[in-house]
Amino acid sequence: MTASNDAIRIEGLTRRFDALVAVDHVSFAVKKGEIFGLLGPNGAGKTTIINMLTTLLRPSEGSATVAGHDVAAERDEVRRAIGVVFQEPALDANLTGRENLDFHAMMYGMDRDDRQQRIAAVLELTEMTEKADVLVDHYSGGMKRRLEIARGLVHRPQVLFLDEPTLGLDAQTRRRIWEYIRDMIHDGSITIVLTTHYMEEADYLCDRIAIIDHGRIVALDTPANLKNILGGDVITLEAGADAGQLLDRVRDLPWIKGATLHGSELTLTVELGEQRVPELVRLGEAAGITIHSVRLRKPSLEDVFLYFTGHTMREKEVSHAEQLREKVTRRARR
């Protein structure tokens, strides 16, 4: 059983696919009533973790409990206690929104009166009441996502899993979905676990975030504490081919807390950033290095990800896409 204040508890959770270790000895706990984020690029292991917690995959090693039930030994009990919004659409386009919700509620054994009450409530929450009797085939992408969230809530789950809940949506619709998610936890009766590779989404929604890379958790804390790990300000200098030379010039300065080179850009974490910018420009000029642009800002989750993994989220996305293309090409040649 989980501790009384934990909705989820994971110890050494591991999942292998032949020689590939998709999730590598992950351990963490999710408190009741919080929004917990799994942040990482495609291929990091986020969805595999969700699939194990929702009993769709069996762990290769380790253990996990959800709402007090073991995901391997008590699969039916886990499924009754959770709601899931999958990354891929799972609605019946030939039914109306209301019919989709009603069918889902019947699958959970809810009686007619309770179904009608809950369907009305979740439709109102997601602002779908006026479209409830329209065929899902006529819904926009954002409307379908809202209906899927409503469906995940209709049977009153203790834990709701959202796998990339705003993937593929425009910025305005994404922000609206965030508001629905925030509204869900106002009374602390539900725990939400979401996966995302959107930094802003994790920062805005999550009480705590686990940053995942290569199937491992490399950092876990509140968004504010993660950003405070870096401390100070972030200065990005664009110096063309001389960026590496500039790094050599500044890396040992006592007020430089961190330095990372990406192509022609040098990213520095410093104290009192506004005062340091002129000094950096002077150092560049003295070395005959032209600094083409300077950006000063507070640390972001992207900086935290870079700090712990050594690469940006975008670089990981591109690398993962290239690996997938290579696999497809090899299979086509067989």
Image (cartoon, rainbow, N blue to C red):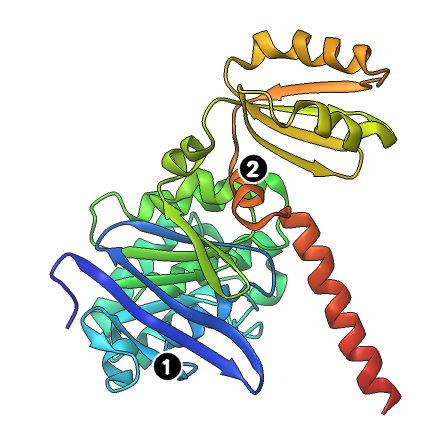
Q: Quadrant of residue 28?
A: bottom left
Q: Secondary structure at mark 1?
A: strand
Front residue of this view, candidates 87 and 2: 2
Which residue matches tag 2?
303
Give the residue at x 33% y 81%.
107
What amino acid is found at the position of numbered circle 2 in the picture? Asp
Does the CB distance between marks 2 and 1 fall below 8 Å?
no
The crowding category of the residue bearing disc 2, from other C-alpha atoms within 10 Å (few below 14, some 14 to 19, many at least 20), is: many
Horizontal and vertical percent position of residue 271: 50, 17
What amino acid is found at the position of numbered circle 1 in the picture? Glu
| Label ID, residue 22 | none
Q: Quadrant of the N terminus?
A: bottom left
Determine whether, in the image, residue 112 is placed left or right of residue 213.
Answer: left
Count of marks overlaid on the render: 2
Horizontal and vertical percent position of residue 307: 54, 42
Q: For the residues marked 2 and 1, what is the alpha-carbon distance in whole angstroms? A: 32 Å
Give the residue at x 31% y 64%.
154
Front residue of this view, candidates 243 and 253: 253
Give the residue at x 29% y 63%.
159
Determine whether, in the image, residue 171 is placed left or right of residue 100.
Answer: right
Question: Residue farthest to the bottom?
Answer: 334
Which residue matches tag 1?
61
Q: Quadrant of residue 49?
A: bottom left
Determine whether, in the image, residue 172 is placed left or right of residue 5.
Answer: right
Determine whether, in the image, residue 24 is placed left or right of residue 9.
Answer: right
Q: Secondary structure at mark 2?
A: helix
Give the residue at x 47% y 32%.
230
Q: Is residue 124 above or below residue 331?
A: above
Horizontal and vertical percent position of residue 326: 80, 73
Horizontal and vertical percent position of residue 79: 30, 77
